[in-house]
Amino acid sequence: MTDNRHTGAKGVRLSGVSRSFGSLKAVDGVDLEIPSGSFFSLLGPSGCGKSTTLRIISGFESPDAGRVYIGDEDVTDLQARRRPTAMVFQNYALFPHMTVGENVAYGLKVRKMSRDAIKERVLDALRRVDMADFLKTPVTSLSGGQQQRTALARAVAIEPEVILFDEPLSNLDVALRHQTRAELKALQHRLGLTSIYVTHDQEEAMALSDQIALMRAGRIVQTGAPRDLYQQPDTAFVASFLGGSNIVDDPALAARLTGSGLHDGRVLSIRPEHIRIGRSEGVQARVTAHQFLGMQTSLTIDVDGTELEARIPGDQEIPADAFVTVEASREVTDDR
Ligand code: ATP
């Protein structure tokens, strides 16, 4: 694996990594190739093994089997503090009795850097996240967003080659989460650090990532760029988890809606935004519920006894007796 010489970032590779807790296989034969300098998300439902995978990369957890490489180096047996990684935690894990500056300096003191060098690094890291004015502020008086940025500065200060994020935005309210998400993306772009980001929020993963690995029950089920995962899901689980989808398993209905049947073990995935509602053309349906969502309206429609969700822009008047046409669909493996 090549290093990114321009930024100092290194890629990460996992080969056959597994980790059990008792009889539970939390991580089950995971292979990953994370390019240097990329923003890579591990996405999946609660308990699917994302955090354990991240902790294995950081060295806080050991795998039962498999190897972890950072750049060309096999780091599987290396202690966490000897790895070129820094972690940003969900609860920020800041020291409450210290100021912002002392928190950011902590990791540098542990590394026995000189006082002057620490001062310079701390200020530099705080400037990068727009927190230089808070150098002497106790962390207990910061807002959630400021704490988040302090945690980020602390990670950046040790100049890691890989930065690991464990649901770092989940404690922020929606508006701040969106703002911090944009800042994080910009910072990652500037620093060019390889970033591995754990989240169960598909929108967050799509907005931030160059690539997403979707996990389920300890395994990676599909990896790809957000657009590719969204447009070309392999299975019903991927289609439903990423963006939501109508899954149709009745071949006759699939044929009525799209003009083509289904192969064995396959089902049809139809995105809600790919269903058009009209007054005269298409397959007859009944609209059974409306939900106004602001920019969109969600409609529940009944076609031959099967309920589908459609999303239409704005707030449109739709008659109860409607006709639906499907603009795009995809046959996927049934792994529900
Ligand atoms: P969440 O989003 O809820 O944090 P996750 O996808 O990050 O979930 P993990 O935290 O990796 O999932 O946990 C995977 C499974 O392993 C879960 O069932 C969890 O209960 C279990 N697990 C994790 N750590 C331990 C541990 N130290 N001891 C026992 N079981 C554990």
Image: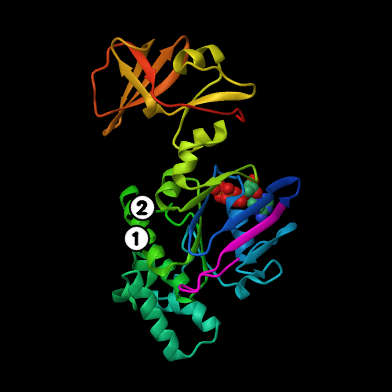
Q: Position of residue 330 (x, y in %)?
A: 50, 28
Q: Position of residue 12 (x, y in %)?
A: 59, 62
Q: Are marks 1 and 2 in contact (CB under 8 Å)?
A: no
Label 1 packing within 10 angstroms: few (<14), some (14-19), many (20+): some
- The residue indicated by pointer 2 is 177
Is 191 situated above or below 316? Answer: below
Q: Position of residue 82 (x, y in %)?
A: 62, 75
| Towards the viewer: 125 or 102 | 125
Viewer can see residue 134: yes
Highlighted range, magenta: 1-19
Tell me which label, 1 or 2, sits earlier in the chain: 2
Q: Is residue 70 left or right of residue 144?
A: right
Residue 183 tag number: 1
Q: Position of residue 212 (x, y in %)?
A: 51, 49
Label 2 packing within 10 angstroms: few (<14), some (14-19), many (20+): some
Q: Which quadrant, please, contains the N terminus?
A: bottom right
Q: Which quadrant, please, contains the C terminus?
A: top right
Which residue is painted at 62% across and 49% down in the image? Answer: 49
Amino acid at circle 1 = Glu
Magenta stretch contains residue 8: yes
